[in-house]
Amino acid sequence: MITQEKYRTRVKELLASNSVKMVIGYKQGSTADRRRPLFVRSFEEADELVLDSNCIGNLAGYLVTEGLLSDEKRVGIFLRPEGIRSINILAAESQLNPEQIIIFGFDTSGREVKALQGEQAEDFSGLIDSLKEKPPEKSSDALLYRIDQMNTEERFAFWKDEFSRCIKCYACRQACPMCYCRRCIVDSNQPQWINTSSHTLGNFEWNIVRAFHLAGRCVGCGNCDRACPVNIPLRFINARMAQEVFESFDHYAGTSQTQEPVLASFNKDDSETFIL
Amino acid sequence: MTRILFSDKLDNCIARWRAAGLTVFGPVKTDTLSSYAAIEHASDFDFESVLPDRSIKDLFFPQTEPMLRYTIKKRAIDTEDFAPPNDKRIIFGARPCDASGLAIDDSLFGWDYKDEYWIQRRNESVIVSIACTKADDFCLCSSLNLAPDSSTGSDVLLRPLENNKGWVVEELTDRGHEAFLAIAELLQDGSDPIAPIAAVPEKFDLDTCVAWLQNHDNFESKFWKEISMRCIGCGSCTYLCPTCHCFDIQDEGDTYSGIRRKNWDSCSFALFTMHTSGHNPRATQSARWRQRIMHKFNYFPGKFNVNSCSGCGRCSRQCPVDMGITETLQKISTLQP
C-alpha cells in the first residue's frame, strides 16, 4: 500500500507539471484478484491506480502502440524487472527512445510490494546485472524438469500434443512486448509463408517461428503463457531458448540499451558446435 | 410426476446410445483444458465446472476444415469435395448458453448460402442440455433475454435434481424424443425435488444498449477508443465465443495440387479487413472492437432478429487484459442514448 500511495502521488506530480502525458499502470479488474491495464491521464484516473502482488502482466508492449511516442512526449509505466529489461530490448532494437519513458519500477515477494530505485531505464542496470548473476535455474519447474528428461521423440510427442490445442488466435503474439512487427510473417499472404490452418503443420510452423524470433529477446515475463486461452505452456519454450543463448553466447536479454541482438550479431568467440 | 434420468443409469444410457450408433460427447476436463469431447463412460463427464473453456461451436464449426482437394493438369483442374462428416452424435450436458449459441448461428449458416458442413452436423446431432445450477461472475445469460435453464437450441433439457441424483427430462424436439426412446426404459417416474437453478444477476439493460448502438451519432463516439484502449487485438474472445462464426478460405499446397480449407478468422485482426491496395477500413483496434459489439447487438439482430451473444461470458473470462462484452455493455447502458 505504501508503494501504491507513493506512486500515485508521483504520478500526480508528473501530470501536474506536464512531465508525462500518460502513465500506464494497473487498476482493479473484474474479480477480486484480477488487475487490468489502466491509462492514467487525470488525477481521477491516478486515484484508480492499484499496485499489489496481483499486478503481474508486463505492460511494456503498450509503449510500441503506433503513434503513442511519436509526439516525443514522455510516458510513465509501471514495470517489474522483466518489464524494464523489455524496455532495454525495445530501445536496443530502435523501437523507442528510452528517455521518453519514466519507469515506476516495482517487484514483489509474496504479497509484499517494493519500489525499485530509479526512473530511467539505465537507473536499473545494477539491478539487472544482479539478475544476470542468477540466471533462470535449470529445471526449477517440475514440468520443465520432465521435459528436460525426455528424449527427442518424447519431447516431439509432448509438444505435438500441446500444440494440437492451438487455435491460432495469436494471443501469445499480441500479449508479447517483443512482437511489435507492424506486419507479422503470418499476416503476410502474398505469398502465404505460414499456413493459417491450425492443423499440426500450421501449429508447429507458428510456434517454432515464434520461438526462434524470441531467442535472446524473451525476458520471461509470462505474458504469452497467461494469454494463451488453451493453456499451452509457452513459457517453457522461451525459457529453454533463453537458457540456450545464455549457455552458448553468454547472452542475457535486456541488460542494456546497447545490447546487440544475439541472432543479429557475431563474435569470433561464438560457439561453433552447430557448424558441421 | 415427472420423468427422471437417475445419475446411476447414465452409464447404461451411454452404452445404449453407443449401441444405437451414436457417438456420445459432453463436457470433459483434462489437466490443461476443458472442452466438449467424445466420451465412453459417465465418469468421463465434467459436470462440476461452470462451463467448458472451449465452446460447443468446435463440434460444428471446427477451427480448420478441408473443403476440397484440387489437382491442376495441363488442360483442366480436377476437384474433389470433402463431404461433411456423417457421424450421428449426442451431446450430453451442453450448457444452455452453448445450445442457444448454436440456434443463433443456425440463422446465419442456413441463410442465403446453406453451409452444408454446419447443417449436416446440426442435423446429425442431438443436443441434451443441462440447466445450470452454478454460475460465476462472468455469466451473463440473464442480461440477454436468456436464462440458466433456457431451452433454445436444445433437443432435450435436463433439470438437475438435488444432491446430484439425476435429472428431470424434458423432451423438446422430435430428434430429442427419438434419442430418448432408446433409453426410455431406463427413465423412471418420480417427484424428487429439483435443485434451484443458478442465480445470474442482470448486468445491464439490453434495450438501452441496443438503442445507443442503433443511434448513428454514436458510431464515432470517443467511447469506443476509451473502452478498447487496452485491447491487444488477439482473437481469443472471438475464437472462444460460441457464436462468432467468421472464417477465411485458404488454398494450401504447391503449384499443382492442394487442399482448400475453411479456417476460423477474427474481426480482431488487422488483416481481416485489409484491402489489396493496403487500405484498411478498420485501421484501429477500437474500430475492430466496435465492429464486434455492433455486429453482435445491432447488425446481426437487424438481419436475423436475434442477438449474436448467448451470454456465456467466455470473452470476459479469458481475456488477457480483462476486457469483454459485459464491461462494454455495462458502460454503454449508462451513456446518454
Image (cartoon, coloured by chain):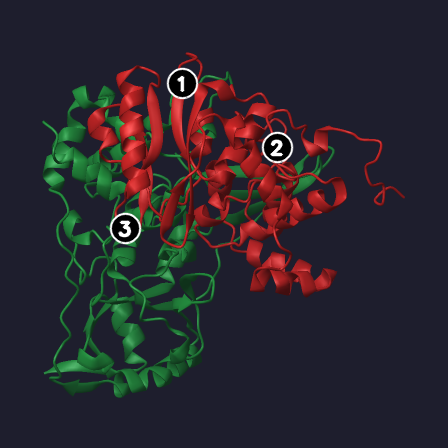
Q: Which residue is mark 1?
A: A74
For residue B218, above or below residue B94: above
Instruction: Tell me residue B186's x, y (percent).
Output: 28, 87
Q: Chain of mark 1?
A: A
Q: Which chain is green?
A: B
Q: CA distance from mark 1 to mark 3?
A: 37 Å
Left or right: B22 with respect to B78? left
Q: Which residue is mark 2?
A: A192
The quadrant in which residue B259 appears is top right
Q: Give the mark nearest the N terminus, 1 or 2.
A: 1
Are discs 1 and 2 both within one chain?
yes
Pointer 2 local density, CA inside 10 Å: few below 14, some 14–19, many at least 20: some
Does residue B280 appear in this view?
yes
Pointer 1 local density, CA inside 10 Å: few below 14, some 14–19, many at least 20: many
Please state which amino acid type lies under the numbered disc 3: Gly
Pointer 3 local density, CA inside 10 Å: few below 14, some 14–19, many at least 20: many
Q: Which chain is red?
A: A
